[in-house]
Each structure stands twice: as structure tokens, then as C-alpha cells.
Amino acid sequence: MIAPFRAAAVQFEPRQFAKAANVASFAALVEQAAGEGAKLITTPEMGTTGYCWFDRDEVVGQVEAIPGATTEVFAEIAARRDCHTVIGMPEVEPETGRYFNSAVLIGPGETTMQFKDKFIALGAEETPATAARWPGGCGAHSICAVVSALL
């Protein structure tokens, strides 16, 4: 049986084209939730940057690889607070140059699982959700209209 744990959902409205400020504000909210005892913290889709973009040229300064600078911010919180956080962010695959609307579960010392949803307007492809074990049990996540569930 899985032991009870506290979960939190962060409500945050990012500002378009203000990634650094968004990440700082977003991290403070995750820090607050972890400080109040949350062991699993979920965050909004594209919470680090907001969305929508007109074209690839407009989003190019917002995407990053996973792991990268943004995931490192939340990995540090996870390690220090012994928690897991699902971060919604735009991703670029360095080897292909494809862009994704991604959600990544970050825990102490590792990126546990990742889901990449397509940027329809930007020509990316969708990948299936992955499932993984974490100290709270088994889980899977997804983005947008795809149903999310913790098993």
C-alpha cells in the first residue's frame, strides 16, 4: 500500500516572452508548496513561458533541452525539499530540432519521466505518455486534453 502524501497544484499565469521572470516566480510557488509539505507538486501546461506563438521564429528563444537551465532550477528545489514536481515547458530536441509542449517530472537527483506533446502549428510530433515509479507510487502524466492519472 502507498503511504499517504500531500500533493499541491500550483496556479500560475505566465507572461508571454518573460521566461526568466516566469521561472523565478514559478520556482517561488513550487518552493512554497514544498515548504508546506507537498511531496508531489503539479504545475500548469507551459507554465515557464506561456503560449501561443505565431511561428517557430517567435518561440525559438523560449525552448530548451531537457535537462537544461529550467529543469536545473526545479531539480535543486526537489533535492533540497525531497519532493517531485511536474513542470510544463517548451522543449527542443537538440538532435532533431523538433519543438515540443512538454511536461517533465523532476525528483530528487533525477528527471523521472517526460511527456512530449506536439506543437501543432510548429510541426512537431506527439510521443506517448510514459509511466514511472516514484516514492509516492506509480504515475503517468500527459498534457492538455489527454487524461492525466496517478495509478
Image (cartoon, grey):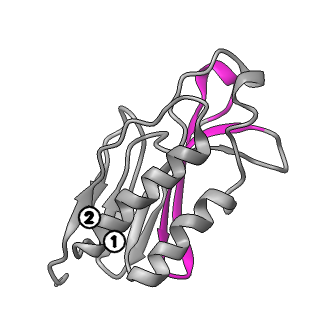
Which circle's residue, 2 or 1, is located before the other in the chain? Answer: 1
Task: Examine the rendered structure and indicate whether residue 50 appears above or below residue 25.
Answer: above
Q: Position of residue 123 (x, y in %)?
A: 70, 24
Q: Nearer the viewer, residue 13 or 51?
A: 13
In the image, what residue type sits under mark 2? Answer: Leu
Task: Examine the rendered structure and indicate whether residue 108 appears above or below residue 89.
Answer: below
Which secondary structure dominates the residues rendered in magenta?
strand
Residue on which the image places disc 2: 151
The residue tagged with tag 1: helix, strand or loop?
strand
Please give the name of the residue rendered at 75% of the width and 37% of the height, measured from the top-left corner.
98
Task: Judge the density around disc 1: few (<14), some (14-19), many (≥20) Cα neighbours within 10 Å.
Answer: few
The residue tagged with tag 2: helix, strand or loop?
loop
Q: Which mark is residue 138?
A: 1
* Quadrant of the image occupied by residue 62: top right
- Split into 4 quadrants, where in the image is the N terminus? bottom left
Task: Judge the density around disc 2: few (<14), some (14-19), many (≥20) Cα neighbours within 10 Å.
Answer: few
Residue 40: in magenta span = no
Q: Determine contact: label 2, label 1, CB under 8 Å.
A: yes
Q: Which residues are magenta?
A: 98-125
Q: Kindly give the residue lying farthest to the right in the view shown.
A: 95
Q: Say if residue 63 shows up in the picture.
A: yes
Please give the name of the residue rendered at 49% of the width and 68% of the height, measured from the top-left corner.
106
Residue 44 appears left or right of 91 = left
Q: Position of residue 2 (x, y in %)?
A: 19, 81
- Split into 4 quadrants, where in the image is the C terminus? bottom left
Please give the name of the residue rendered at 71% of the width and 48% of the height, measured from the top-left corner.
64
